[in-house]
Amino acid sequence: DTAVSQTPKYLVTQMGNDKSIKCEQNLGHDTMYWYKQDSKKFLKIMFSYNNKELIINETVPNRFSPKSPDKAHLNLHINSLELGDSAVYFCASSQSSGGAGNEQFFGPGTRLTVL
Amino acid sequence: QKEVEQNSGPLSVPEGAIASLNCTYSDRGSQSFFWYRQYSGKSPELIMFIYSNGDKEDGRFTAQLNKASQYVSLLIRDSQPSDSATYLCAVKAGYALNFGKGTSLLVTP
């Protein structure tokens, strides 16, 4: 009965490669997010989709491209990986995002290591 | 840049004591505030949220909000060693959450 799941949990790859991380939620939420947590543990929003529509696109390199095939899935594709991309990437979801409420539930994270 | 500030700690309290975690935010228009707990190597876990000025209690946890002072806090009563973790304050900004850098709490037996 996993709520928000991500695959893979660990990803080790060489610089210059292209990789994808997948996220799925079974909470019936309509908004999903990608966050990046760096080595100093700072958690920062990257993207958000609401009902498959991109609503947040923070200042991240255009090597990062999110895709939402449906409202239960949000994937993150990263081209030409660089050393600085090494981090933990968290997917999250919430039921809508308007108004005051925005309780977000996080997946287990994907630890990306670029060598 | 809308900022959320937290003392990084570590905050060390003895078992059974009250732990007090503080957070300030810069966006005066913020409406929703959240506390997450993150154990090392794990994902953030929602503990509490608060929208209105005053206190909100849930078990051993109390969130306090003072919008005039742009201040939100989390009190943990009867602290247990299992409460040792990083506590993240988050403020809703549009659709996303702006997180502070977290306060590391250590509860010593």
Image (cartoon, coloured by chain):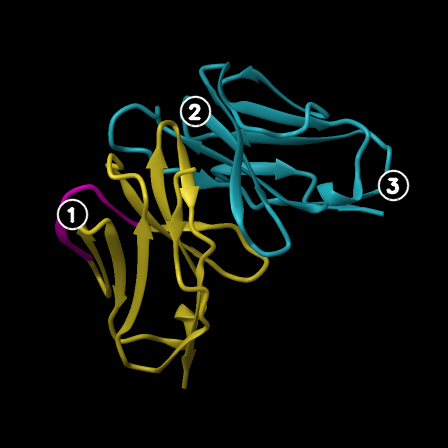
Chain colours: A cyan, B yellow
Local SS, label 2:
strand
- Image side of residue A65 versus residue B33, left or right: right
> Marks 1 and 3: CB-CB under 8 Å?
no
Kindly identify which residue carries mark 1.
Answer: B68
For the stretch drawn in magenta, the main secondary structure is strand
- The residue sitting at 26% across, 75% down in the picture is B18
**Image quadrant occupied by the C terminus of chain B:** bottom left
User: Which kind of residue does numbered mark 3 sit on?
Assistant: Gln
Local SS, label 3:
loop
Quadrant of the rendered image containing residue A102: top left
- Image side of residue A64 versus residue B60, left or right: right
Mark 2–mark 3 distance (CA, rounded to whole Å): 32 Å
- The residue sitting at 64% across, 30% down in the picture is A22
Kindly identify which residue carries mark 3.
Answer: A14
Q: Identify the mark nearer the N-term, 2 or 3.
A: 3
Q: Residues within 10 Å of mark 1 (few under 14, many from 20)?
A: few
Q: Nearer the viewer, mark 1 or mark 3?
A: 1
Q: Chain of mark 1?
A: B
Kindly identify which residue carries mark 2.
Answer: A31
Which stretch appears magenta?
B48-57
Is B51 part of what is drawn in magenta?
Answer: yes
Local SS, label 1:
loop
Tell me if I can see residue A11 in this picture: no
Q: Is residue B62 above or below residue B9?
A: above
User: Which kind of residue does numbered mark 2 sit on?
Assistant: Thr
Mark 1–mark 3 distance (CA, rounded to whole Å): 50 Å
Q: Percent x, y for residue A95?
A: 35, 27
- The residue sitting at 27% across, 37% down in the picture is B30
Q: Percent x, y for residue A67?
A: 61, 19
Q: Chain of mark 3?
A: A
Is A114 part of what is drawn in magenta?
Answer: no
Q: Percent x, y for residue B56?
A: 16, 53
